Amino acid sequence: MNTEKFKHISDTELLHYFNNDKNNEWLGILLQRYTLLLLGVCMKYLKNEEEAKDAVQQVFLKVIAELHKYKVDYFKSWLYMVAKNHCLMQLRNKGQYNAEINEQLLATPDETQAEESFIQKDIVLTNMETALQQLNKEQRECVTLFYLQKKTYQEITAITNYSLLQVKSHIQNGKRNLKIMLQALQQNG
Amino acid sequence: MADDLKDILSNNNNEIDNRQLMDYLRNQLNNTDKHEVESTMNDDAFMNDAVEGLQNFDAKKDVQTYVTQLHDDLQKELSKKKKRKDKRRIKEQPWVYLAIIIVLLLLVLCFVVLKNYL
């Protein structure tokens, strides 16, 4: 199916069409948008190309069978949780993963990113430099290089001698810590 | 500087399309585009996990082959479902279809009679 001609239709609209007429073709278009990402997520957890491909097929079947049972607002987040849970279940069945998997996640995906509260920018800017100084050296260095100097991961790796994984983790943790610090400063101020 | 500081907190909601993502994986993007993909990855756990997984494929050309196969299988599955649905619909309403066939036969019969005897 040529998905290019549906490119202008958003996920929400496609989901709406599917909910209206239960025509699986809408679902097909929607799922094809995420095949590559799903393959990557399954590969990350299962670490085997064939198993990852099979897992994506299973996720497709699961979505086709179960989507109508849930009220899904953010298809992308929901699909990610379905795929991640499927992989974790597989690992658990193979005895490689013992954590309890909360079935509730299927129905209520973590949408914190989508609902993240807005922080007033003026206050943020006043506090940002202070907060940046409070980060540990590694996080401050990576956040500054990435966001202020617009360097790529590879460039930061070369400048700092940290591994790629370390760079990513310092940036992501640094950003999260900055948000926490700024929210605290905002509440106190 | 102030704008850059704001960038740290803003969520990058840019949608990275599959072609751009494949170019990133093949290391074929310039630094500005690369930075944009990475900035999206920082705010999108789905994308971040996907890139980490896709980087583990031995050959990047296999990724595209797998995606094509998965699309074909998905289409087969969806058309199978559609056929089953259509069959079920016929099974669930046999009288409606029977009535339609009878009406059509009667029309043909009328036509033949009218043509031959009038």
Image: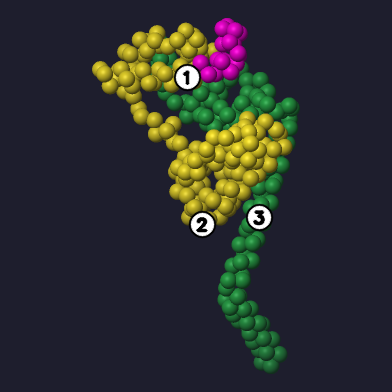
- Crowd band around label 2 with a 10 angstrom C-alpha radius: few (<14), some (14–19), many (20+): few
Q: Which mark lies nearer to you, 2 or 1?
A: 1
Instruction: Please give the name of the residue rendered at 73% of the width and 32% of the height, measured from the top-left corner.
Output: B62
Q: Amino acid at mark 1?
A: Asn
Name the residue tied to disc 2: A21
Residue B35's spot in the image, x, y percent? 55, 19
- In terms of sequence position, does the residue under pointer 2 or pointer 1 come before the other? 2
Res A115 visible: yes
Residue for badge 1: A173
Q: Amino acid at mark 3?
A: Ser
Q: Is residue A99 above or below residue A71?
A: above
Quadrant in which residue B7 is drawn: top left
Host chain of mark 3:
B
Check disc 3 and report its element: helix, strand or loop: helix
Q: Position of residue B71 (x, y in %)?
A: 67, 43
Residue B90 location (% of width, % of height): 61, 70
Q: Colour of chain B?
A: green
Q: Which residue is mark 3?
A: B79
User: What amino acid is labelled 2 in the image?
Assistant: Asp
Q: Residue B68 falls in which quadrant of the image?
A: top right
Magenta stretch in the rendered image: A152-170
Q: Secondary structure at mark 2?
A: helix
Does the magenta portion include B107?
Answer: no
Alpha carbon separation for disc pair 1 and 3? 45 Å
Q: Do the residues at pointers 1 and 3 share their chain?
A: no
Residue nearest the viewer, comparing B112 with A61: A61
